[in-house]
Amino acid sequence: MSSLEPAEQICRKLTESLTKGTFARLVLSAPVASGDTPQKILGRFIMLKGVPHLSLTLRQTTRDVTKNLPIAEGATWLREQLARQFHSALLCTTARDWQFISNAAGEARLIDHQPSAKKTPAREHDQRHAGILDDSARDWLQGLDVLDVAGKVRVSMADKHRQINHYLEILSHLAKECGWMGAPRAEAGKQKAEDGEQKSAFGPPPSAHRLPPLVLADMGCGKGYLTFGTWHLFRRVLKQPVQVIGVETRADLVATTNKLAQQIGADGLAFVAGTIDSAQLPRVDALIALHACNTATDDALRRGIELGAKLIVMAPCCHKELRPQLGKPAPFAPVLRHGVMEERMAEWVTDGLRALFLEWAGYRTKIMEFVAGEHTPKNLMIAAVRERDGFTDPAARQRIEELKTFFGVEKHALDPLLAAANVKTV
Ligand SMILES: C[S@@+](CC[C@H](N)C(=O)[O-])C[C@H]1O[C@@H](n2cnc3c(N)ncnc32)[C@H](O)[C@@H]1O
C-alpha cells in the first residue's frame, strides 16, 4: 500500500481518473456539520465549451447548488473538503472504486473495491441535464410559482423543481426507447433542418406538422407541474407535434391550468375535468399517472392498456389495498410483525404485482427510484413499454397467481385483467 496519507491518495486517484478518462462519479457524504451546508456532494464529468470540468451538485437541505470546476482544480478542492467538510468520499472509476473514510479524531483510511461502473456515463446526458428546464420553460414554471419573478427557483419549490427535471430526464429516455425521437420523425423534420432551421440537441428540428401528433394523457394531474413539463419536453425541446391531456377531478385546478396553458400559448395542451377510470379519452401513445392515490394507480394502469398506450409511466402513491389481506408466510412472519416492515412489504407486493400485470399485458417493465429516498420511502416509478401482444403468455399470468398465493392476496384491483376477455381496447 502507498505511504501517502489516505486523503492524498484519493485526491491523486481523482486527478488520474479525470485525466485518463476513467472517472465515473464522485460522492462526498457524512458531513462534519449539519444545517444549511451541503449534506452531500455529487460530482460528474462534463464538457463546458469543449473544456473538461468536474460538475458538482451541492445538495443542501432545501436546494441544490451547482458548481463547475476545471479538472485541474479537482484535487485541491477535494483535499479541502476532506480536511474540513466531509468524513466520507466515494470515487468510482472504471478501474477501481475508492472509499475514503475518516472519523472525528482525524483517523482515516482508504479502501478499494471492484469497480461498480464498467463504463463512464454518457457525456450526451450531461447536455440533456442542463437543457430540459432551460429558459424556454420559464413562462410555465413562473405561472406555477416554481420560479420567482426573477426566474430563480423558489426555495420552497426546490424539491418540486428537481422532481420535474428528474421526471423529464427519465421521460426523454423512455421516449427514445419508444422510438419517438428516432429516425422516422427525424426524417420527417429533415427537410426543415436543411432549409436552415435550428437543430435541437435532443432530436429532430421543429418538425413537419403533417406527422400525427403523439397523444399523451396525464391522469390525476393536480396543479399540472408534470403535465406542463411533459408538454414542454415534447413540444419545445423535442419539437414534436403533440397533444397532452391532463385529467383531474378538481374543476378549480382544471380551470387554473387551462388558463395558464392559454396564457403561454401552449398549443396541444389541455386539461379536462374527469376521473381516471372514466374520463373520455382518445387512443393514447403514452399514459402517465404520478402520485395517484391507492388503487387510482391501478385504474390508470388498466386505462393505459385499454387506450393502447405504448408507454405507461406511474409513480404509485399510498398503498392501502393489500395490507389488510397480506399473509405472513414463513420465514417472513417474525419480521412482518413490525408494522413498518409489514407496510413496506405491502408496498413491495402491490408494486411488484403491478409490474407483473403489465408484463402479462405485453409490456417490458422496469421499476426504478424516482426521487431520492431522503424525503419519502414512496419513491418508486414503474415504467412499461409495450413490446408484444398482451395476454398470450401463460407463464406471465402464472407469475401473478403465484405471487398472490404466496402472500395470501385474494383480491387485487387488477384481477379483471387475468381474464383477457375483460380488456376492452379502443
Ligand atoms: C397527489 S396529486 C398528484 C398530482 C400530480 N400527478 C403530481 O404528481 O404532481 C393527486 C391528484 O390526483 C387527483 N385525483 C385523485 N383521484 C383522482 C381520480 N380518480 N381521477 C382524477 N383525478 C384524481 C387529485 O385531485 C389530485 O389533484
Image (cartoon, grey):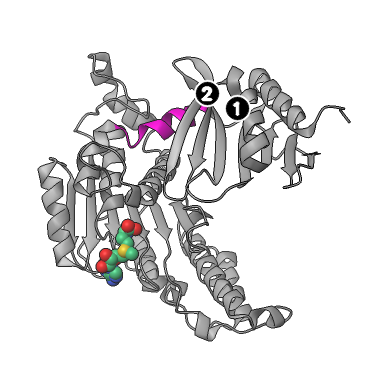
Residue 22 in the figure: left or right of residue 227: right
Image quarter of the N terminus: top right
Q: Which mark is residue 277?
A: none
The span shown in magenta is 123-134
Label 1 environment density (alpha carbons within 10 Å; few <14, some 14–19, many ≥20):
few
Q: Nearer the viewer, residue 419 or 273?
A: 273
Q: Which mark is residue 77?
A: 1
For mark 2, give the secondary structure: strand
Label 2 environment density (alpha carbons within 10 Å; few <14, some 14–19, many ≥20):
some
Amino acid of disc 2:
Leu
Q: Nearer the viewer, residue 85 or 274?
A: 85
Q: Which mark is residue 69?
A: 2
State the residue lying farthest toward the front: 105
Separation (CA) of disc 1 from disc 2: 9 Å
Which image quadrant for residue 190? Answer: top left
What number of labels is visible? Answer: 2
* For the residues bearing labels 1 and 2, Cβ distance under 8 angstroms: yes
Q: Position of residue 202 (x, y in %)?
A: 37, 29
Q: Is residue 117 something one can see in this rendering?
A: no
Instruction: Please say if 337 is above or below 426.
Output: below
Which image quadrant for residue 66? Answer: top left
Amino acid of disc 1:
Trp
Residue 149 in the figure: left or right of residue 48: left
